[in-house]
Image: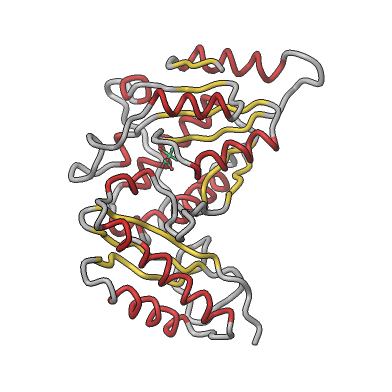
Amino acid sequence: MRIFSSIPETSAALRDLRTSGQAAPHSVGFVPTMGALHAGHRSLLQAARQRCDVVAASIFVNPTQFAPNEDFSRYPRTLEADCRMLEAEGVDLVFTPTAEIMYPPGAATWVEVEGVSERLDGASRPGHFRGVATVVAKLFHIVQPDFAFFGQKDAVQVAVLQKMVRDLDLPVELVVCPIVREPDGLALSSRNRYLSAQERPQALILSRALQAAAALAERGEHHAVALLAAMREILQEEPTVRVDYVAVVDPATLLPVETIPAGALLAVAAYVGSTRLIDNVLLKRTDG
Ligand code: PAF
């Protein structure tokens, strides 16, 4: 596994990997990350390894997607352990740029995906998805992947990036991988490590609320308002958990739906202590 922080070295190494050896050109799969890797990231790496000839990953805690009051400075940085996981999963190349490399002095160009970027997490975290779209567009230009792998857990990020890829005709296919959960249902997140021993069981209320609403939908409940009420009722059982939003939306536009169409997205964001957690479920079709 080769590790680079420079853009020209990364591009040159990827050019070699793509074009050298038998049966070239080889397909390139890309897993962009902010490090602090966990089993959710491992599932993305494995999906990339299965599907692509060459696998590249990036580790970059992107400052432009954090608001000044957010956790940029204390975001976990675990480079050595991350590299061990990347190596074990057969990654060929890792790009680990600095902020100065990604944003040279005077950088003033942004990618703004209007509409979806302002909904759900975008409403609570203004500017967040401008930072995400900009850095991912830059990473796509540097790595030039054929496939890029993202987790369904970040459902809003997925909607924003799908739209960016479509609107800018970027030659990459996004592959969205299922949420990976702890055995008790907690969706894996790098931020779970902020939870205290007391908060950890409280955090289960998010997945419990989603599961209950999904079960209602599976039993034939068509009305979003009923699913929202069921989720809110369960979330209230944990008085220390502060709900940011609960939503039933179209997964592509993130606009609310009134009746449940195929594939509607049930989503929740809530603070457990000072840690903001998100989780979601993509509903199956209910025809009853
Ligand atoms: O999902 C993440 O870890 C980040 O938002 C991403 C896509 C690596 C961009 O910084």
Residue 112 in percent (x, y) is at 40, 45
Residue 178 in percent (x, y) is at 57, 53
Residue 256 in percent (x, y) is at 44, 72
Describe residue 181's horizontal placement relative to residue 272 as left or right.
right
> Which image quarter is the N terminus in?
top right
> Which image quarter is the C terminus in?
bottom right
Describe residue 73's horizontal placement relative to residue 174 as left or right.
left
Residue 240 in percent (x, y) is at 21, 67
Q: At 53% from the left edge and 85% from the top edge, which residue is drawn?
A: 221
Q: Nearer the viewer, residue 141 or 66?
A: 66
Describe residue 281's horizontal placement relative to residue 26 as left or right.
left
Q: Nearer the viewer, residue 95 or 79?
A: 79
Residue 134, placed above or below residue 212: above
- Total labels: the figure holds 0
Residue 102, placed above or below residue 47: above
Q: Quadrant of residue 21?
A: top right
